[in-house]
Image (tube, rainbow, N blue to C red):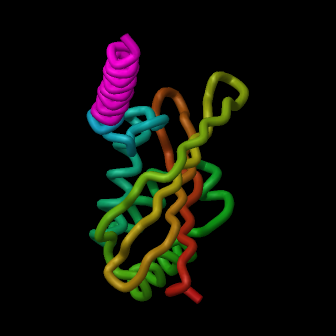
Amino acid sequence: MKKERVEGSRNQKRLSLCCLLLTACCLLITVACNPDPRQSGIPPLAQERIDTVSADINEGRYEKIYNEASAEWKQTTTLEQSNAIFNRLKTNLGNVKGRTYQTARAEEQGAGGQTLVVRYHTSFERGEGMETFTLVERDGHWLLAKYFVNSDALK
């Protein structure tokens, strides 16, 4: 009788362990199958704007970036200053090789608009850094308000 209880106890422990492992596997599969994590918290139209600005930077279309930017951008810099900043980035860092999404933070503004700050850890041709895009929503369109790269290669 004692032997049956010991065996039953062992079987119960094995069953519990199997259930625990099965649950852990299901959890891992769920996490692994999540949609693209870089999209997390970023509205699709805002992501499109980030992608467009990124392509424009890589292609040297700095005047286009300035012309399509928000009033906030144009209040803080002239076209010449903006071009000089992007030229310095391109000279010191080169083109973007890859990005890893870090965070996105949205803030509501008056009159129904919002601000979105998106950060990436970015690998460039000649260094690495943190890239920050600040976008503002105006009439359903996302516009670049600020762009910042923090990298030792810029010091």
Q: Residue 33 sits in which quadrant?
A: top left
Is residue 135 found left or right of 67 in the rendered image? Answer: right
Q: What secondary structure do most residues of the magenta stretch adopt?
A: helix
Q: How many marks?
A: 0
Residue 43 point in image, percent of width and height:
43, 33
| Range of residues picked out in magenta | 1-30
Q: Residue at x 43, y 37 (%)?
A: 40
Q: Residue at x 49, y 73 (%)?
A: 129
Q: Residue at x 54, y 35 (%)?
A: 137
Q: Residue at x 44, y 76 (%)?
A: 128
Q: Is residue 13 magenta?
A: yes
> Closest to the observer: 139 or 4?
4
> Closest to the observer: 55 or 82?
55
Quadrant where the N terminus sits is top left
Residue 75 point in image, percent of width and height:
67, 58
Residue 116 point in image, percent of width and height:
57, 41
Q: Is residue 147 magenta?
A: no
Q: In the rendered image of this protein, does residue 2 appear above or below residue 103?
A: above
> Closest to the observer: 38 or 55?
38
Q: In the rendered image of this protein, does residue 90 appear above or below residue 27?
A: below
Quadrant where the C terminus sits is bottom right
